[in-house]
Image: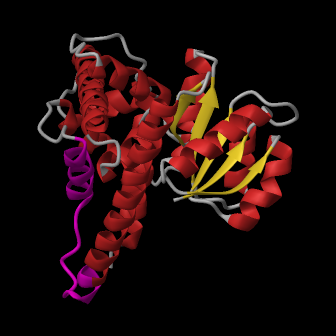
Amino acid sequence: MRYFIVDDDAVSRKMLEKIISEDNLGLVIGEAESGKKSLPLILATRPDFVLIDLLMPELDGIETMEQLRIQGFEGQFIMISQIVNKEMVGEAYEKGVEFFIHKPINRVEVRNILRKTAERFQLKGSLMTIRESLAHIESTKTPQKQRTVKEIVLFILNDMGIAGESGSKDIVSIMEFLINQNNPPSLLPPLKELYEVVASMSKSDPASIKKESKSIEQRIRRTITAAFNNLASLGTIDYTNPKFEYYAPHFFEFQEVRLRMKELEMDNYETMKVKINVKKFLQTLYLETKEKVLQLP
C-alpha cells in the first residue's frame, strides 16, 4: 500500500512514517504540513491512502478531502484527530473517511487500522474485477424482455431487504404514478399529495381517502425505517458489501446510518429514534427507477 501523510505536526508525521515502515505496512510516498500544500502532491503521486489530520490551518482535513475529490482523486482517506465531535465525525464519514486514528498516536491502533483498511482495499479491487467480468458476461447474453416499473422498483427494494414489507406496494404505486407523470426528480409533488393519489386508487369518498392516506404514510415510513436498519446491520457485518456501499449513502443521511451502526456494534438492538427523510428516499428511488426505464430497449 502507498501512503501520503498530511499533518501540521512534524512529530506525528514522523511517528506514522516510522510505524508504517517498521511494521511493513506499506510505503510512505510523501507528506505535507498543510492541506493546501498537499493538494498538488497527492494529485501527482496518487497514493492508495491519505492519512490526514482533521484540524489544520488554511484548509482543514474535510475541506482538503473535498478539494481532492473535486479534482478527481479516487484514493481512500484515514482521518487523524484527537477531537471527538459527533457532528464532525459524521461529516468526515460522509466525505469518505474509512477510519479514524486518534491522537496521541498509538502504534497498535495504527497497525490494526492500516491492516484492516488494506484488506478492504484489496477486497474492493477483487470485487471490482468480478463485477467487470459479470458485466461482460451479461453484455454477451441474449437481451431479456423489457421489465416493468414495478419489477424495477421491487428489485431495488429487495436489495434493501424490504420488498416483502406492506409499504412496498404503496411505494411501487407512487413510482408508477411518477413515471407516468414524468416529473423531474427535483420537482416531485408534496408527500401528502402522493399519498392521496395512491389512496384514491382504492378509495372514492374524501373521508376514506384521507384515512387511507394516513395509513399509507405510516406503512411507507415503517418500510423505509426497515431498509435503514437493514443497511446499518449489513454495514456492521461487512462495510465493503456492495449493497451497503451503494444504497446507504444514496438513500439515507449517512451520518444517521453510522450512528445506528455504532449502536449495533455495542449490541444495542432496541428501536432508536432515527431521522428518516422519506422525501429523499422517494426522490432517489424515482431517479434510480427513471434511469433504468430509460436504459431499457
Residue 38 in the image, given as x and y percentages of width and height: 79, 50
At 31% from the left and 11% from the top, the residue drawn is 272
Residue drawn 56% across the image and 42% down it: 19
Residue 41: within the magenta?
A: no
Let me know if residue 84 appears in the view: yes
In the rendered structure, the answer to whether residue 228 lies left or right of residue 70 reads left
Looking at the image, residue 157 lies above or below residue 278: below
Q: Residue 110: percent from the left, percent from the top?
A: 50, 36
Q: Quadrant of the C terminus?
A: bottom left
Camera-nearest residue between 94 and 13: 13
Report the side of 257 relative to 19 (left or right). Answer: left
Q: Nearer the viewer, residue 8 or 188?
A: 8
In the rendered view, would you say 254 is above or below 50? above
Whether residue 178 is visible here, answered yes or no, is: no
- Give the magenta part as a residue range: 137-160
Is 250 left or right of 243, judged from the image as shown? right
Q: Choose between 65 and 215: the one closer to the eye.
A: 65
